[in-house]
Image (tube, grey):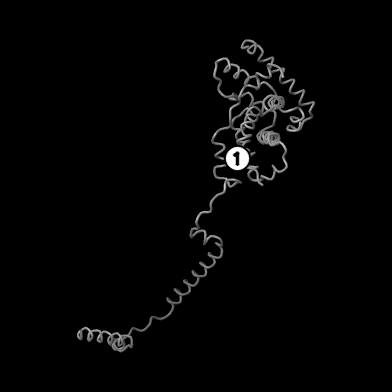
Amino acid sequence: MNDFERKLRLQAFRPPPPDLRDALFGRAEIPGNVIQPSPGTWRDWFWPSPQAWAGLAAIWIVFAVLVVGDRDNSPPPPALSATQISASPTLLSYHSHHDLDHVLELAN
Amino acid sequence: MPPDLRQLYDEHAPALFAFLLNFTRREADARDVLQDLFLKLIARPEHLAGVQSARAFLLRLAHRLAIDAHRRRATQEAAIERAAAESVALFLPATSPDETAFRAALTEALAELPADQRAVVHLKLWEQMTFAEIADALDIPANTAASRYRYGLDKLQALLRPLYEELR
């Protein structure tokens, strides 16, 4: 190697752009750069089988359509008369409870 | 055990970038090829298994990727020579005006070399590789590497001699 070659060898080249290293290794999952697992979200739980969930949703929609259609076609239920309402066991029970509470309050 | 690619980058990226910058004469190309090279290694680190000289392996890979990149863009020699005519900052800024002038002249002189000579001159001068190693890296016979170096160096000397003599 002569003086001219030695002179050339001393010329220092520019280094690579500093951002290139970050672009390569900043977020890549490579040996020595272990990415911590993030806590699961609701999407992580639901997303693994989107087709199954879509199928289930479709079945529910079909059921909903059938139920609404059936309700529209069926005749309206007969209205209860005043005597039927007052004679219903539930209401009688309610009245009995109400009366009993009232009696207990008076007793205290 | 998988190689530490960050350490590999820190050790070899400056030399690879210098080679690519000198070979392609375009900063964008040098950057793209260097990035492509390391992305390949990140995806397939097993490529490095059994490699004896990482520097020689990486330079060989960088050269091939640079050739492929230019083939994709246009015919190889025409594209590289066109790029060689473009102005590119190869070297770090010098501290003295004389060195600044010499580096500018060297940048222009290197652009005058054909790409194949420039690659050999770079590997010989700045990587201090033997002709056998250069031949292996560039897939050429060792005699061809030696002759390309001699032609390239003679041309650089012819172009730079006046300034070189003046600065001595």
Question: Does residue A42 appear to the left or right of B58 in the view shown?
Answer: left
The C terminus of chain A lies in quadrant: bottom left
The picture places residue B133, in percent across and down from the top left corner, at 75, 31
What SS does tag 1 mark?
A: helix
Residue A45, position in %: x, y? 52, 61
Work out whether residue B163 or residue A50 is closer to the camera in this orientation and state it.
B163
- Number of numbered discs on residues: 1
* Residue B22 occupies quadrant: top right
Horizontal side of A79 relative to B47 (left or right) equals: left
> Taking B98 as reference, is B70 above or below it?
below
The residue sitting at 56% across, 60% down in the picture is: A48
Give the residue at mark 1: B6
For the N terminus of chain A, the quadrant is top right
Q: Is residue B149 above or below residue B3?
A: above
Crowding near pointer 1: few (<14 within 10 Å), some, many (20+)? some
Give the letter of the chain under mark 1.
B
Q: Position of residue B32 (x, y in %)?
A: 61, 36
The residue sitting at 55% across, 40% down in the picture is A23
| x, y percent for residue A50 | 55, 62
Callout 1 amino acid: Arg
